[in-house]
Image (cartoon, helix red, strand yellow):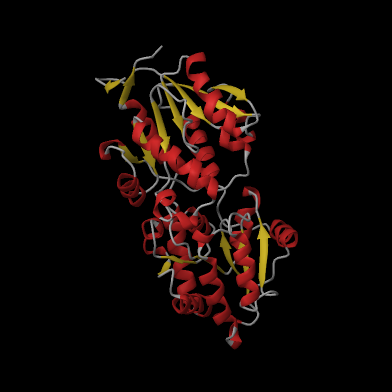
């Protein structure tokens, strides 16, 4: 049961689901980790935190043991979602539970907040694996309808969530997202050389970072890159695709062979967080042709590292990059070829985009996001339910 807070926010015990952090850190996990760290670093919250971890406490959170209570659950994610996390609410007398990555399980009761990143789960079923269609999409829709507040990461996503779920528009809040401070130009030549050697990177390359899946629209990028490679001045260029193979990754490999790019595309695979700043720094250009994003963090991470960006004009990407990147229709392979050529050949454009990008990326901080989330916590007053 919730009612508006009058005066100063009452001290609450808030559980935060950190079970996603046992997985490889990609977009959703990076958001959860950054948000939890931001909340624990912020000294303005009047609330007590109980951090629910799966198997182990993430190393980046170990230093916060004095600021929160950490509890460790079973190694199975499904078991955590469906049974263990609902049990914790009663075991620790939690007033509120925040789910910053995965949606709460079907057995979840009591007041909770849920982060929903975008409407991709409902916009186009062809983008989804069978598990996302039959499990994640209905569970997330249910969470959005029942959450006391739904947090999201852009105005575009806020509108999408309202459109595709039964969430009350008054309860859907754009609290933002941030770029980790580790994303900045890497100047250590030994470090750059180490990362170059680890992934077999060429001297001159265009970079794209993201899971190999249909929504990332890599077929159009490969067609555009093939067009660029046919030009004499671009024959030394390579394309590096960094990201874990996801549902539909086989189609990417087929498209590479079909375009005759076998030796010109490097599939770097999953790149851990610690290597990404060096990877962005070494790229001459970052490209992101995604068909749909609730925000689009990789282009902004690349900007923070001083790399010029060309990205799609779809979804929330224009909102994320602002005027600091060139944007192209995701279906226009010729437009992508032209935009890449412009950045590669025009030093003035490269320098302008690099400078504007760093300024743009600096706007997105976890301090700002944490303050927004604490504001949401403070706007709610809960009574413990038996």
How many discs appear? 0
Q: The N terminus is located in which quarter?
A: top left
Q: Which residue is pictured at 58% across the width and 65% down the height?
A: 207
Residue 319 pos. (x, y %): 36, 57
**Left or right: where does residue 104 sit relative to residue 258?**
left
Above-or-below relation of 351 to 131: below
Residue 33 lies, with reference to residue 293, above or below; the image says above
Height in image: 205 above or below 236? Answer: above
**Residue 307 higher or lower than 259, as above or below:** above
Query: x%, y% of residue 377?
Result: 36, 28
Res 326 quadrant in image: bottom left
Q: Who's the residue at 48% across and 70% down the image?
A: 351
Name the image quarter holding residue 203: bottom right
Residue 63 point in image, percent of width and height: 61, 29
Residue closest to the eye, 70 or 284: 70
Q: Quadrant of residue 60?
A: top right
Q: Nearer the viewer, residue 188 or 12?
A: 12
Can residue 181 be seen at all in this image of the molecule? no
Residue 101 in view of the camera = yes
Of 18 and 124, which appears nearest the observer? 124
Q: Is residue 110 left or right of residue 308?
A: left
């Amino acid at each position: 049961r919730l009612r508006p807070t009058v005066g100063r926010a009452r001290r609450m015990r808030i559980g935060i689901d950190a079970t996603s952090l046992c997985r490889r850190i990609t977009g959703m996990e990076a958001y959860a980790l950054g948000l939890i760290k931001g909340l624990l670093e912020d000294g303005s919250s009047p609330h007590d935190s109980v951090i629910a971890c799966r198997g182990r406490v993430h190393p980046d959170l170990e230093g916060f043991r004095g600021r929160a209570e950490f509890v460790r659950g079973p190694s199975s994610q499904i078991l955590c979602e469906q049974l263990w996390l609902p049990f914790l609410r009663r075991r620790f007398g939690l007033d509120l539970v925040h789910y910053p990555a995965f949606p709460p399980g079907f057995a979840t009761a009591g007041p909770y907040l849920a982060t929903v990143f975008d409407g991709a789960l409902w916009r186009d079923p062809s983008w989804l694996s069978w598990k996302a269609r039959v499990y994640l999409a209905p569970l997330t829709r249910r969470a959005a309808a029942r959450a006391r507040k739904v947090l999201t990461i852009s105005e575009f996503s806020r509108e999408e969530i309202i459109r595709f779920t039964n969430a009350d528009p008054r309860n859907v809040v754009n609290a933002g997202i941030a770029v980790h401070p580790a994303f900045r130009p890497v100047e250590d030549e030994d470090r750059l050389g180490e990362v170059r050697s680890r992934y077999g990177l060429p001297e001159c390359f265009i970079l794209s970072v993201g899971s190999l899946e249909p929504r990332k629209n890599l077929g159009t990028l490969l067609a555009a890159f093939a067009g660029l490679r046919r030009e004499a001045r671009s024959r030394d260029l390579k394309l590096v695709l960094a990201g874990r193979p996801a549902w539909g990754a086989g189609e990417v490999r087929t498209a590479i062979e079909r375009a005759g790019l076998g030796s010109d595309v490097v599939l770097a695979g999953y790149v851990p967080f610690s290597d990404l700043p060096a990877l962005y720094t070494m790229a001459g250009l970052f490209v992101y042709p995604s068909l749909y994003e609730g925000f689009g963090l990789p282009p902004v991470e690349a900007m923070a590292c001083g790399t010029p960006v060309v990205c799609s004009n779809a979804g929330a990407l224009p909102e994320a990059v602002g005027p600091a990147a060139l944007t192209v229709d995701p279906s226009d392979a010729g437009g992508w070829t032209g935009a890449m050529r412009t950045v590669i050949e025009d030093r003035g454009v490269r320098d302008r985009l690099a400078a504007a990008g760093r300024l743009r990326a600096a706007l997105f901080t976890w301090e700002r996001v944490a303050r927004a989330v604490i504001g949401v916590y403070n706007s709610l007053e809960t009574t413990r339910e038996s």
